[in-house]
Image (cartoon, rainbow, N blue to C red):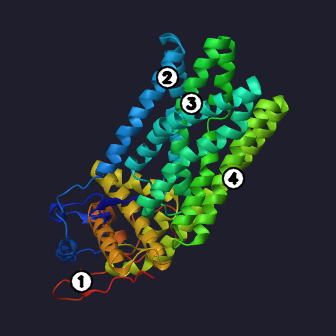
Amino acid sequence: MAVHVSGWVAPIRSYRADAVPRGRAFYGEGLRAGEDRTWAVGYIRGMASLDPRAVLKERPSIGLISGLVVAGLCALVSLSFDVLDGDPVQFSIALVLAVAPVPLLLAGVLALDRMEPEPRANLVFAFAWGAGVAVLVAGILNSLNLLLLERWLGRSAHDLVATFGAPPVEETMKGLVLLGLLWFRRQELDGPTDGIIYAGMVGLGFAMSENVSYYISALSENGPEVLAATVVLRGVLSPFAHPLFTSLIGMSVAYAAAQRRNASGVVMIIFGWVGAMIMHGIWNGFALFGGLGGLAVAYLLLMILLIIELIVIIRDRRRIVGLINRYLPPYEAHGLINQADIFMLSSLRGRRQARVWAKAHGGRAGVRAMADYQLAATELGLLHARAARGGVEEPAFRTAQRSLVELMAYARMSFPLPDRHRDSAARGVPPPGYASGYGAPNRWAGPQPPPPGRPPHPHEQEPPHPG
């Protein structure tokens, strides 16, 4: 996740260095008992190129807002067609049944996005695109295909369109938003997990709107029994079908984002796109022509795809942890991180425990600071990885690096250390609950004060190189 100011990364939040309570020790300082802390506050002040009292938030661009408006209008048009297909009562029932599981499904997708959360505005847009633009245009194109084929094939045209026509149309409409991310938000695609998350959002939006149509059709044409069966099949047994199909495109787009705009990225996108259409067609075809046996085979293939993608996410999470361990240790000399922090950042459990620790000792401000510190540290590791593969120019790297370093510094100043733990911290032991499981206290090396004299200015110290 990143926040953009003037086209590049800026701190999500900043903290007032001069608002640090006097008489309290802060874990981020790493000072021994009795030593002066004023140099640390001055050091942080010296780093600030932005107003430290500002609280920077994500501001959606005009293009993003316009896209959300268009997607919303398309969703309203699509729902108006559904209203015309059935009476208001049937529409209301179908809408409730289609929307009811969405919060739980969204929670399931977002639970996979905890290591490096994506910007909320981007996630909302992806969902809105699926629920509005994609489902409306796909519905129109599928209807036109059906009208054309019915002239020659009669009633059998419906199943053929569902098997061979709908998958290319629907996957293309869903995949377009992923291509948009690749073109306009390339820096947000840091790995296959990001592609899966965005694909999941657009797929859930598409499935929600599509289910309204299916539920109205089932209720109006066949009654409550068929409606119940349709809800079980689409809403209970296969709610992640659309997200899983489109995630093949998402992973291929994320791969392309890591390349230097060469042919391999294009080839991978084509493979992912074709794979999504084939999986979608197999699912529809087996469900329509294979009976219960065919449906079971299709469901098995869907579960295999789900397991594969979960493995990909786990491996990608380990990759991010590896980047943190590789690129962040050089920042120890700048007082931004230590071995206990790296240990904490290396697992979701450790991050959660650190936020609990920060909330217990610093309240809402403490947990907010810890969350920002964790996110900025993760983004810093990913930034180095992009630079190492040539995905960011040196000036842009330095601008982004400085912003993330400032955020980490401000956040670190907001980690309060209770007085009873000052002595142990002075001996190099992290406070209880901060990095549970971190052994060998002698490995922990907190930020060390500079030599006597004028505090160093960050511009006078060479920061880690992007490589």
Q: Earlier in the sequence, mark 1 or mark 2?
A: 2
Residue, disc 2: 81
- Looking at the image, residue 70 lies above or below residue 396: above
Q: Residues within 10 Å of mark 3 (few under 14, many from 20)?
A: many
Q: Which mark is residue 275?
A: 4
At mark 1, the secondary structure is helix
Q: Earlier in the sequence, mark 2 or mark 4?
A: 2
Residue, disc 1: 459
- Looking at the image, residue 235 lies above or below residue 424: above
The span from disc 1 to disc 2 (Cα, nearest Å) is 61 Å
- Observer-side mark, 1 or 3, equals 3
Of 96 and 275, nearer the camera is 275
Q: Disc 4 marks which amino acid?
A: Gly
At mark 3, the secondary structure is helix
Q: Disc 1 marks which amino acid?
A: His
**Tag 3 near tag 2, CB within 8 Å:** no
At mark 2, the secondary structure is helix
Residue 6 visible to the viewer: yes
Residue 90 place in picture, x, y as percent: 53, 13
Please indicate whether residue 444 sits to the left or right of residue 316 in the image.
left
Please indicate whether residue 3 sits to the left or right of residue 22 in the image.
right
Residue, disc 3: 210
